[in-house]
Amino acid sequence: MKFRGTQTIIIWSIINIAVIIVSLIYLNRASSIIFMSVLIYAFIYFFSYDVEIKESKIIVRTFFIRRQIYDINELKFIHAITIRKAGYIYIQIGKSYAEEFYILVFKNNSKIKVNAFLKYKGTSLGRYLKKQYHIPFKEFEETKYIYGNP
């Protein structure tokens, strides 16, 4: 099963189209080509970045190339990190969780940072591993302040 950022792909495609149109209207040809190439690269990166679980292994891919393979049995626990900014009001709509990324900690103390926007049928990778493989799950909330963290 593959965990992909489908909602992110939709948002990035809309942003790409809007920026390309604005750059073609208001900027010269050279700068609009630079904008288009950077945005198309970002779009391809988000489209090609996924995490797959196959035969109790976690396979991380970038640009459709197998980058790293990890064994699920070696997972010690999962940290779910939520970042809040001081002074902001947060409204959560729907059943989604507020975490922004997961840190998968293995028994040899190596760590992987995985974004929470990677989902399979509405379930994020960390929540799936917690439910299916009964891996200990800890939720943390970090607060960022305007003038730096104390």
Image (cartoon, rainbow, N blue to C red):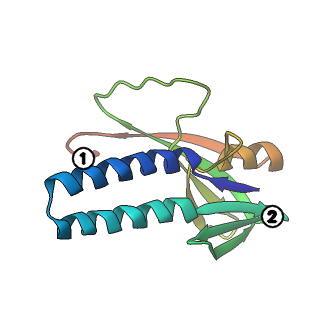
Residue 30 drawn at (x, y percent): 19, 70
Up-down: is 90 above or below 82? above
The answer to whether residue 149 is left or right of residue 43 is: left
The residues bearing labels 2 and 1 have C-alpha atoms spaced at a distance of: 41 Å
Q: Amino acid at mark 2?
A: Lys
Q: Position of residue 111 (x, y in %)?
A: 58, 64
Give coordinates of residue 81: x percent, y percent: 51, 45
Q: State the residue at coordinates (35%, 24%).
A: 89
Instruction: Give the mark, 2 or 1, whose residue is nearer the N terminus.
Output: 2
Looking at the image, residue 51 sits to the left or right of residue 23; the answer is right
Q: Look at the picture and state if 60 lies above or below 21.
A: below
| Residue pointed to by mark 1 | 148
Quadrant showing the C terminus: top left
User: Which type of secondary structure does the marked residue at label 1 adopt?
Assistant: loop
Q: Quadrant of residue 95?
A: top right
- Residue 93 place in picture, x, y as percent: 52, 23
The type of residue carrying mark 1 is: Gly
**Residue hosting label 2:** 54
- Mark 2 lies on a secondary structure that is strand
Q: Is residue 29 left or right of residue 122?
A: left
For label 1, the crowd category at 10 Å Cα-Cα, with few meaning under 14, some 14 to 19 and many 20 or more, is few
Number of numbered markers: 2
Looking at the rendered structure, which numbered label has been put on residue 36? none
Q: Nearer the viewer, residue 15 or 74?
A: 15
In this orientation, which residue lies closer to the viewer: 101 or 24? 24
